Image (tube, grey):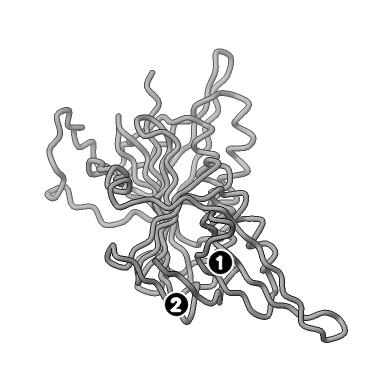
Amino acid sequence: MRFRTLVTNSNLLLRVVQSIDKLAKSAILKLTTEKLHIIVITDVDSGLQLWSDIAINALFSDYRIESIHGDEIYLEFNIDNLQRALKSAQGALNTTLKLTKKQGIPVLSLVIQNQSNTGRELTLNQDVPVRVLTPLQMDAIREPLVPDSQVHIMMPPLNSVRSIAERMKGMGDRVAVSANREGEATLRVSNDLVEITTFFRGLENLAYDSSTQEPSANPTPDRGTGEFYTAVVDMKNFLRFLQSYHVAPKNIVCCIIEHHSLVFYVYIGSTGYGGVSALNDQTCGSLTYFIPVRQV
């Protein structure tokens, strides 16, 4: 098993790791010949899950990976440890990332080369301990299968939503996210004394073809384009999703699956400073958040 590469976009990689920092203490890194995947599962049965993929050429160059498992490597790592290591690499002249062993313990090692004020070359090594997972262990980790959503709508600017959600969180422990097929969405929070609703209009609905929708055991009747569909989720999970602002995406697609979940597709541009269109081939990757509905 071998892995070694030059890191050409440590800023983007750091921003992706920062976006998952509030989700859990550890995550899974899946390395393949074409993509880097980061997976976070907070609770297999009822918690938020994150599944992400980023094109290798958006992050690395001189990329080398070998394994007897189809040139795929699976590593469990501490999110905070990797975040600290990547912060040390910001602005470096050269950064190498490799999988190695230190005192018998597998580590992701960042070799960071920089230059002092006097022009002397400085080298810093940052080691992140990892646990190597087997293909059998990875087989038990599957991306959620969800029914077709009733609404696909582009999210408003994430900073606006974050500001509103931060003010709402003291009002209740769950938030109702609603949208229709006419570019309208709402956020609603309530308690025994008050109810607050924020309205968004002029959003973009993605193409919806009801003829392709799979039947379900409890189908939701088609209510017309102006009627709202709603999913009620834990406020803390909604706020965790909003940490994706770190990758500064321009495009986030919200999919509402009533009585089941919210799914958010966060599209990343190659610079990490504002994505390009979610619907073209210039994106270098995406973060997909699965948030189950809150059972009353």
Residue type marked 2: Tyr
Q: Quadrant of residue 30?
A: bottom left
Asked whether residue 202 appears in the rendered view, the answer is no
Q: Residue at coordinates 68% horizontally, 80% vertically from top-left?
A: 93
Residue 114: x and y, percent?
Answer: 73, 78
Q: Which residue lies under the disc numbered 2?
A: 63
Q: Nearer the viewer, residue 162 or 44?
A: 44
Q: Quadrant of residue 10?
A: bottom right
Q: Work out whether mark 1 precedes mark 2 in sequence or the reverse, and give the earlier one.
A: 1
Task: Point out the frontmost of discs 1 and 2.
Answer: 2
Residue 164: x and y, percent?
Answer: 60, 40
Q: Which mark is residue 12?
A: 1
The answer for how far apart the CA atoms under marks 1 and 2 are is: 17 Å
Q: Quadrant of the N terminus?
A: bottom left
Q: Nearer the viewer, residue 228 or 8?
A: 8
Left or right, 183 with reference to 142:
right
Residue 246: x and y, percent?
Answer: 59, 56
Asked whether residue 258 appears in the rendered view, the answer is yes
Numbered disc 2: secondary structure? strand
Q: Residue at coordinates 82% horizontally, 79% vertically from top-left?
A: 116
Q: Is residue 280 above or below residue 115?
A: above
Q: How many neighbours does mark 2 have within 10 angstroms: few (below 14), some (14-19), or many (20 or more)? A: some
Residue placed furthest toward the front: 103
Residue type marked 1: Leu
Q: Is residue 33 above or below residue 50?
A: below
Q: Nearer the viewer, residue 272 or 25?
A: 25
Left or right, 219 with reference to 174:
left
Q: Residue at coordinates 40% horizontally, 26% vertically from top-left?
A: 294
Q: How many neighbours does mark 1 have within 10 angstroms: few (below 14), some (14-19), or many (20 or more)? A: many
Residue 202: x and y, percent?
Answer: 44, 53
Numbered disc 1: secondary structure? helix
